[in-house]
Image (cartoon, rainbow, N blue to C red):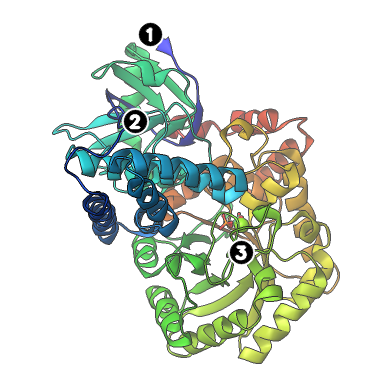
Amino acid sequence: MQNFPGVGVSPGRVIGTIRQMPKPISEPPAGEQLPAGTTPEEATAALKAASQAVHDELKARAAHATGDGKAVLEATALMAKDTMLIKGAAKLVARGTSAERAIWESGSSVSEMLHNLGGYMAERATDVLDVRARIVAELRGVPAPGIPASNTPFILVAEDLAPADTATLDPNKVLALVTAGGGPQSHTAIIARSLGLPAVVAAVGVDELPDGTEVYLDGAAGAVTSEPDEPLRAAAEAWAATASLLAEFSGTGATADGHLVPLLANVGGGKDAEAAAKLGAQGVGLFRTEFCFLERDTEPSVEEQALAYKKVFDAFPGKKVVLRTLDAGADKPLPFLTDSTEPNPALGVRGYRTDFTTPGVLDRQLEAIALAEKQSEADVWVMAPMISTAEEAARFASMCADAGIKTPGVMVEVPSAALTAEAILREVGFASLGTNDLTQYAMAADRQLGPLANLNTPWQPAVLRLVGLTVEGSRAEGNNKPVGVCGEAAADPALAVVLTGLGVATLSMTARSLAAVAAVLKTVTLSEAQQLAKLALSAPSATEARAWVREKLPVLEELGL
Ligand code: PEP
Ligand code: MG
């Protein structure tokens, strides 16, 4: 047996044989010239045809994908036809460089430029390299890099998965994911969670194992072990037996003593919402509206927006749907709203702040929401992302009132909002804690970076204190406003108990996690949850907070969570 410890990002205990991602496409030699008899015009035409073919292939895969996977594939497809990428290559071809070498070099410059911009743009740098390799493969007439084909299910191992690969994983073929690189908020991690695949990231050395090696993987503990022994086999068997229990959610979230904690879904559009409704979600706690328009260069019309919103509302007639206004910027740029040259996008003009620089878009979005609401039966709540002050909250509430929206709220994801929650909640009807950004800003740790994974966890006592302060603010004299959580923290069953103990009223998560969270929540009373919240708050570190709480929740071990 050999251990490859990593960071667990999606629970599940499985045993399977591994398949490594194929070796990447080799670099065309430096200085490679156009073959004799090929004109630059012919080579440029071939290059454009290859870029179009890659675009079309990714786009076609996007058509069969849903939710996050779809958005990722669509964004990568667009990258294949990126003007800067193709023009850069065409210039080199005009000077006699081979088409393969030209796209390779152009890809390097675009990727480097994006990397230097930092934040979300740096994350996209890998996508350009992925697209570049696909274009070279197309030019060479060899298979594109990607998931290996196999008739039998396998555990997929890679250095790190590109978004275009992870997005189309067939959960019937792939048992689990392991990457040697990547962080807990990487595309790989988010997509693994939304597909319900056990996954471990940052397991150094695992990419050296030969194909066919049998490994045991525990996606909760972050463990990968080759040549598993009997106890590990028994653990995987036990998980297989309980996994089916975790696939079903009764539709009511509650503690053992009947304290209700509605469990809601995070969705990015109509299809997600329909899937979430099928999985028993009690409503939608976060509708990321920007996910509907990631591909758009121009602002969608009010009618087009209303149609997209109505699809989500219609999946939850009579139920609560919390819609978030466009959270453009940083990790989710929208060309019609965000400035791609900002030096520090996570601290830039994102979320509600885009109304400072592009006024009108938010008003029109509120108009579209009101229009969709009129035509549906959902109980529609609307919140603004990245609110930092009570003044902003008051202004957003008045914009909502002007549009005829009854329940305005805010996301609490900037530490200043948590610290001034009392004043903010006097202005609006509710708050929802975005623990992904709240953690990144409280810890000053980019949520996309693997090396900062230990800082970037909502188990940090500092983050838990900000959650507690927000709830306190909401309960101040005359306030009494509900506070929910819609960040990834809500999908961690142990943390869900702590959040409940801190006084959070609702939990919203990827729909696949609903059953696991419900199963753990129902094993504790409210007062036990409150004790566990105190315990977590008193811990000196995130690691201890998590370990102390998990120790008191034996059900986690029983269920393999
Ligand atoms: C968050 O920040 O926790 C959140 C829910 O929003 P997003 O992940 O879309 O930034
Ligand atoms: Mg956020």
Q: Foreground: 553 or 347?
A: 347
Is residue 336 among the parts visible in the rendering? yes
Q: Which mark is residue 1?
A: 1
Cα separation, mark 1 vs mark 2, equals 36 Å
Residue that numbered label 2 is attached to? 27
Q: Secondary structure at mark 2?
A: loop
Q: Residues within 10 Å of mark 3 (few under 14, many from 20)?
A: some
Observer-side mark, 2 or 3, equals 2
Disc with the residue nearer the chain's start (1 vs 3): 1
The residue shown at (31%, 29%) is 26
Residue that numbered label 3 is attached to? 339
* Image side of residue 465 versus residue 517, left or right: right
Q: Residues within 10 Å of mark 2 (few under 14, many from 20)?
A: few
Is residue 172 among the parts visible in the rendering? no
Query: What is the three-letter code of the residue carrying label 3?
Result: Asp
Query: What is the three-letter code of the residue carrying label 1?
Result: Met
In the picture, which quadrant includes the N terminus? top left
Disc with the residue nearer the chain's start (2 vs 3): 2
Q: Foreground: 292 or 44?
A: 44
**Outermost residue, right side:** 477
Ligand 2 picture quarter? bottom right
Disc with the residue nearer the chain's start (1 vs 2): 1
- Residue 46 lies, in percent from the top left, at 22, 51
Q: Foreground: 443 or 85?
A: 85
